[in-house]
Image: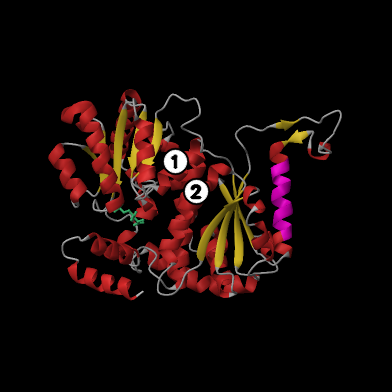
Amino acid sequence: MSLALNTSYLRDFVSPAELEALEPYVETAHRLLHSRSGQGSEFLGWLELGQNRCLEELARIQAAARQIQKDSQVLVVIGIGGSYLGARAALDFLRSPNYNALPKDTPDILFAGNSLSPDALNETLELCKGKDISLNVVSKSGTTIEPALAFRVFRDLVEKKYGKEGARKRIYCTTDKAKGNLKSLADREGYQCFVIPDDVGGRYSVLTPVGLLPIAVAGCDLQALLDGCAAAERAYANPKLSQNDAYRYAAIRNILARKGKVSEVLVSYEPAFVMLGEWYKQLFGESEGKDGKGLYPTSMCFSTDLHSLGQYVQDGSPILFETVLALKRNRRDFYLEPEAEDFDGLNFAAGQNLSAVNHKAFMGTLLAHVQGGVPNLVVEIEDRSEYTFGYLVHFFEKACAMSGYLLGVNPFDQPGVQNYKTNMFALLGKPGFEEQRKQLEQLLSDL
Ligand code: PA5
């Protein structure tokens, strides 16, 4: 078992009867999901990515990763949102947030096209100077402006450095099988392409080629990752609320939100999980935040953030609950030697491993927050292995789908994301947006 949901600290906040009352709703939502007849059912490919893995595509990804490892010191991954966050989270979780700086025999991995900041772009270009590079541009639609602009710049760089023919061998596109500007360009230029399945939306796509290629370049084991996902798919295919941790988690979120706990903090005690928190925020935020509904997802890394946001969690607006992602086994522990002199009076914390101190910080914080009226759920995970990561990804995705259905929203669309794009295109003068531009300019001059 890679993951266990511990609800024993919730006693004062959620009663067994409240959970039981949700059972029929959960079973209905389960039926809708698994019969593919609920809202957004055209985007349910992620339900079986572990069990239905495409071996041919996997072999191509692994071959491309080996080629990149052989001919590049840097892989630049260009993408945003669901085409960026999963790979970033996986890299930190499976390798390290300091992956690029640590000694290793795999290429550095840089991320670009996830903002419109010239400083960020210039810095990434700077980091590529004098290095052999490959590009992996990731965009399902193939039309997203942030990665598309960054790709122009990096493609130009690669073409100038290696010539058009050389560049062809260093540009890998992950996109739709047939549609979009990126696919047309890739076909025209002869870039190798990996397919994002039609039925998997961006934020559910980390275990498709979107995440798999960069993860493989970092030297991680894709089979173990998908084995973990497949095991979770089987575990969370159980329609019974009491026997399905992903559904129990979703149901508890729903109950807490109805009691005014409308913001969930994903807490961890590991800096390597910070980007997983960013991935989780997109998954739940974009899936649930619509039709005036949805829990507000946020994340904190303790004990770091206990020194910045701890005060708010303990004593601020009573709208929060915490889901703690608790790691059972660190990769490498650190023994704290007691000091003969004990001049700083810290010997009470020494003579043990740092993980034991971290654990006491976790228990002390959990008890203080629970006593302060902040409900706490604990998701215990074994380790930082590929298997566990695959399992965890499916746990959150399945819980998110159930949570969305319980809220009565479509967890697989994102209509609200279009609004800023329309305004930005209009303000930039994109052809076809003339009317909106006039309206926005009027609005701005009225301010
Ligand atoms: O989850 C989503 O659908 C979005 O976050 C997209 O992944 C994001 O907008 C990037 O889109 P694309 O992959 O089409 O460039």
User: Looking at the picture, does residue 169 appear above or below residue 249?
Assistant: above
Classify residue 410 by image quadrant: bottom left
Name the chief secondary structure element in magenta. helix
Under mark 1, the amino acid is Leu
Classify residue 428 by image quadrant: bottom left
User: Looking at the picture, does residue 48 appear above or below residue 24?
Assistant: above
Which disc is residue 265 wearing?
A: none
Q: Residue at image x 56%, y 49%?
A: 3
Q: Earlier in the sequence, mark 2 or mark 1?
A: 1
Classify residue 186 by image quadrant: top left
**Residue 192 visible somewhere in the drawing:** yes
**Mark 2 crowd level (few <14, some 14–19, many ≥20, 10 Å Cα):** many
Q: CA distance from mark 2 to mark 1?
A: 15 Å
Q: Position of residue 434 (x, y in %)?
A: 18, 68
Say whether marks 2 and 1 touch (CB < 8 Å).
Answer: no
Q: Residue at image x 35%, y 39%?
A: 122
User: Looking at the picture, does residue 147 appear above or below residue 400?
Assistant: above
Viewed as shown, does residue 23 lie left or right of 149?
Answer: right
Residue occupied by mark 2: 276
Under tag 2, what secondary structure?
A: helix
Residue occupied by mark 1: 225
**Mark 1 crowd level (few <14, some 14–19, many ≥20, 10 Å Cα):** many
In this view of the protein, which residue sits in the foreground, 238 or 355? 355
In this view of the protein, which residue sits in the foreground, 63 or 142? 142
Q: Position of residue 342 (x, y in %)?
A: 85, 33
Q: Residue at image x 79%, y 35%?
A: 350
Write down the region rendered in magenta: 357-368
